[in-house]
Image: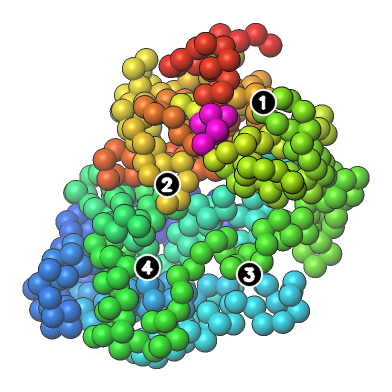
Amino acid sequence: MRRALWRALGRAPQDIPWERLRGYERRFPGCVRPWNRGVNGAGEALRERLAAVLGCPNLLARVVPYMPRIDDASPLPRVAVGLSGGVDSAVTAWLLKSAGFDVTGVLMRNWDEAEETGGECSFEKDQRDARAAARAVGIPLTEVDFVKEYWHSVFEPFLRDFDGGGATPNPDLACNRHIKFGALLDHCLRSLDADLLATGHYARIVRIDETNPPRLLRGIDPDKDQSYFLASVRGESLERACFPLGGLTKREVRELAAGPANLPAAVTRRRSSAGICFIGRKRDFGDFIQEYLPAEGEMRVDSSRGDRRGEDSSRGASGSFVSVESGEAVGRHGGLARYTCGQRARLGGASVPWYVVGKDSRGGSNSVYVAPGADHPALFTTSAAITRCFWVSGARPRGMDTDRGAKLSAQTRYGARAVSCTARTMDARSKTSMLVPSVFCTPPDLDEVLGRANADVAAGAGAVIEVIFDAPERAITPGQALVLYNGDECVGGGVVLYPGCTELELSRTGKRGDDSVSRTT
């Protein structure tokens, strides 16, 4: 059984039979019983070692609950730490090493930037800094290449999800699901004989008992909480994950790095990473993505990978900025993929700033709808439909399949405040019950959506969920993740299919509240 299981784990991340991992207890070398993962906390020896290096009871109380679960009668688990060269992963490795765990650093290479720039890529700096951090902490560092896995599991779906340019996908959730807590976790368990994968994420994992899946909670630092990016990670993967920084603030982590950890200046002074990993800080997103999305009438082929870089010839095409107030063209743009909802449109000669409300790619129109002013009512809506759902526990939250729905809170982008909402499953049998989409977006093919939902509604992923916000929310963007919370607990979410009618549309029709009304096709 186990031999067959590990052979199965050698497959691509999306092919791993995660359901067969549920309840599987891997024994430590020499351990006479399975690892006790059912409680949080640590043995007394571990507490004493951490107390000696932290020197602060308050910090100790907020670090220990999120360290690997052990007791004094069991051998310490072997922990692999995903090192990126940044301060967060370095402090994570230092905390685990200081506590007495057997720690190995792992550096991933996911993107071959030098192939495009012809010069030094950001990975080479990551490599230098990760090696310096590993030396300072006193742990070995291994490097692993996931360029191929990243291309097929993250980047190709990212390009497809542009949906003719009408959507703005976010690859970071897919990277965590398929690469960090998919391919990397699998590599650490099989090739490094590790028991856990630890990362520097600002989030918390809480395990109640052995019979329930782990719970994913927000990090205590509201400015750095990264549970949004972890929302699609499978519960089976979280069983083998560890986030020691979840109870700390970014400021405290930097103080530990420069103080008791005594990490190199290249690490302690390094700026926090920002933006999509394959673009970096210095590249313009529009310029980058246009290299992969074909211009009008053009089909590009990547000879190095043997893959087509685009399928729809309209994705890179230019079009018009269209005013939501007059319906008239007010300027020209250089391609739908360059713009996202809520972004400044930068119309030449405009007396006030204009902002992107939505995009329409049907029929080759390639219209970008814009409105004057950052608080224009066309930018706000009280509803959205999400699909391709993911749930930390593997099942939709209780109450979501009822007429009343589940009372939760929603976060519509990273760093945004969570807003109270009601989420409920739409009737997947009929288009007449579907939430009415805004006219300022590419309308979805409801037949295709409902067909996909009906095929997988029992598993939860294919369901279409309507989310009704208690107050209008700004710039709901098709393709982005909408993550749902029950208090501090991240329960999952889905990808925005379309926003509901905007405040501008509702004011014109005189309708308020739930705009889930019958529609004809």
Marked residue nearer the N-terminal end (3 or 1): 3
Mark 3 — residue?
Answer: 282
Which segment did they paint magenta? 375-380
> Which of the 4 image quarters holds residue 376?
top right
Q: Nearer the viewer, mark 1 or mark 4?
A: 1
Using the image, determine if residue 375 lies above or below residue 454: below
Residue type at mark 2: give it: Ala
Using the image, determine if residue 109 lies above or below residue 366: below
Using the image, determine if residue 457 lies above or below residue 429: below
Front-lying residue, 464 or 306: 464
Task: Characterize the local packing of mark 2: few (<14), some (14-19) or many (20 or more) Cα atoms within 10 angstroms.
Answer: few
**Horizontal and vertical percent for residue 228?**
41, 50
Mark 2 — residue?
Answer: 416
Residue type at mark 4: give it: Gly
Q: CA distance from mark 4 to mark 3?
A: 24 Å
Q: How is the image coloured?
A: rainbow
Front-lying residue, 46 or 272: 272
Whether residue 416 is visible = yes
Q: CA distance from mark 2 to mark 1?
A: 27 Å
Q: Is residue 404 left or right of residue 98?
A: right
Residue type at mark 3: give it: Lys
Q: Say what secondary structure mark 2 lies in.
A: loop
Q: Say what secondary structure mark 3 lies in.
A: loop
**Horizontal and vertical percent for residue 55?**
13, 80
Mark 1 — residue?
Answer: 325
